[in-house]
Structure formats: structure tokens, C-alpha cells
Amino acid sequence: MDFKKYVRDIPNFPEEGITFKDITPLLQDAKALAGAGDALFELIANMEIDKVVGMESRGFIFAPILATHLNAGFVPVRKRGKLPHQIISESYELEYGTDVLEIHVDSIQKGERVLIHDDVLATGGTAKAVCKLIEKLGGEVVQCNFLMELNFLKGREKLSGYSVASLIKY
């Protein structure tokens, strides 16, 4: 399935000079949504995974679906101040600013094998911050998995040393 035809460009969002890749057309089409979920699963189908970590907010779409297929738990990583229990945090840079991500301290156990999923790999800052959080908790990052990758932003370089897979590449 050609998933690119379900992604539209939104110029100058969230700020001037940025072209946002909008996946809502893919999410609104039942066949494209199911196909993308199946294709993402194929990227990790033969790996043993204990937890799937999804980043706020679009990582929350496919990460629980992948977790269910893998018989694994789902762990949300959220922006500062959104998680109610004891947390650890990591700051990161993205293509248009900086932010902080948080994870519950009891969400990953020492030695657990973790799949990280997000909708897009851009500069790699978000995914790298999540890798650090998982490793601080004693987890092992098995793969960083993305619906799409913006190759021109070289995010894969920031994730050197980790397995990286993406369904759509720009």
C-alpha cells in the first residue's frame, strides 16, 4: 500500500518555514489505518518485546496497537506535568524548540525489552530523549519504530547505535 498518498503537507505549521506532515487522512481511512498498523507490526514481528513506549501525542495512536499485537504492555511518555505518579524526565531539542518528556518511574523494569514508537522521526531529539529515559530505568531499547522518517533532518544519525525502522521515508 502506498501510505504516502494518505499524508498531506501543511506549510508553515507549527511555525513559518516548517512543512508539517499530517497523517490524519491516513487515520481517517479504515484500510490505510489497518494497513499501516499491520506494516508497522511487520517491522518488529519476530522480536521479543516486553513494553511498547509511545510518545505524546501521535505516538499514542499506533503504540497501543503494536503492544496488543506483541502481547506487551503500553507505556505513555508525556510532556512535562501530564503524568500523575512519580516520574523521571529528560529534556530534548526538536526542529522548532525545546521541551521535556516524562515517564513513570515504575513503567519499565530492569532488563525489559522495549520498542519505542512515534509517528515521525525528524531531528531525532524526541526519540533520543526516550531512549535515555528507558535506559535510566534499566530497560533495553530493541528498536525505534516510526510511521514516517524525514531523512533530510538526519534524525537517524542522532539514534546511531539503536535499531531504527520506518514505514514511510521522505
Image (cartoon, rainbow, N blue to C red):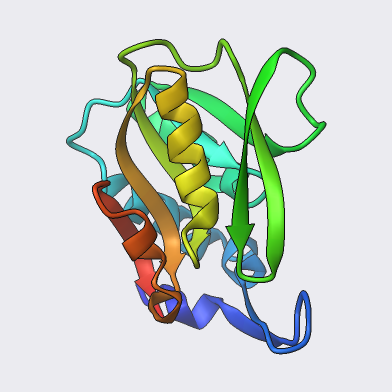
**Residue placed at 36% from the left, 51% from the top?**
40
Of 152 and 132, nearer the camera is 132
Of 103 and 40, nearer the camera is 103
Residue 77 place in picture, x, y as percent: 61, 34
Q: How many numbered circles are shown?
A: 0
Residue 12 place in picture, x, y as percent: 75, 86
Above or below 160: residue 67 = above
Visible in this render: residue 65? no
Among the 4 quarters of the image, the one containing residue 158: bottom left
Left or right of 23 in this view: 141: left
**Residue placed at 55% from the left, 26% from the top?**
75
Above or below 72: residue 161 = below
Residue 117 place in picture, x, y as percent: 46, 45
Q: Quarter holding the N terminus?
A: bottom left
**Residue placed at 71% from the left, 13% from the top?**
86
Among the 4 quarters of the image, the one containing residue 8: bottom right
Q: Quarter holding the C terminus?
A: bottom left
Visible in this render: residue 100? yes
**Residue placed at 61% from the left, 62% from the top?**
94
Above or below 121: residue 113 = above
Residue 149 place in picture, x, y as percent: 42, 69
Above or below 162: residue 50 = above
Left or right of 107 in this view: 115: left
